[in-house]
Amino acid sequence: MKILIETERLLIRELNKIDKQDLFEMDSDSEVHLFLENKPVKTIDEIEVAIELISKQYEKYGIGRWAAIDKRTGECLGWCGLKYHHERMNNHINFYELGYRFKKKHWGKGYATESSLAILEFGFKHLKMHSVFAITDPKNLKSKHVLIKLGFKFVKTFTLDGEPTDWFELHNNT
């Protein structure tokens, strides 16, 4: 399997079907989905469909959400990565969004920050991104803390699918 990015503790590579059990563990957890429309998955088939959709993003845009693998144990801890949005969101179109999601048992260990720093470096260097955006539920204080630690600036709260959503931006000033 091709490793896209390596950090001190993580290997970051494309998601595939071997990750489905780990992703099911993560995405069936109601606490993981507390700030994600509160809709945890109920079947492994839902995970397989999600992996297929992400695979299509790899084919179409060359990027997507990637598996975050613990170098020591080989466990898929969750996912992280960039998603290319070609549809309008918050008056923006054709932009990259940073995202991350990890199994609850791995929260608070710095994996979101570690993986995101590497992904941002990859995006600015290899994809020649000028800006990257992130969204989160206004009540998701831990995610907002990660984004601010990464250098993102809060811009505004807007409505997405009928729900308030915080919009963050990071611009490459080099």
Image: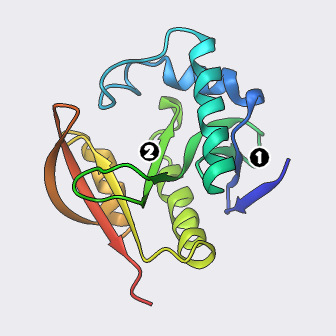
Q: What element carries label 2?
A: loop
Q: Residue furthest bottom?
A: 174
Q: Is mark 1 on a helix, strand or loop?
A: loop
| Amino acid identity at mark 1 | Arg
Residue 152 pos. (x, y %): 31, 67
* Sequence-wise first label, 2 or 1: 1
* Residue 72 to residue 91: above or below: above
At x 34%, y 30%, the residue is 36
Quarter containing the C terminus? bottom left
Q: Check disc 1 and report the residue beneath it.
A: 72
Q: Which of 63 and 26 is in front in this view?
A: 63
Q: Which of 60 and 52 is in front in this view?
A: 60
Q: Are marks 2 and 1 in contact (CB under 8 Å)?
A: no
- Picture quadrant where residue 44 is located: top right
* Residue 7, numbered circle: none
Q: Check disc 2 and report the residue beneath it.
A: 108
Residue 154 pos. (x, y %): 20, 62
| Amino acid identity at mark 2 | Gly
User: Viewed as shown, does residue 166 lie left or right of 112?
Assistant: left
- Picture quadrant where residue 63 is located: bottom right
Residue 121 pos. (x, y %): 56, 73
At x 59%, y 33%, the residue is 53
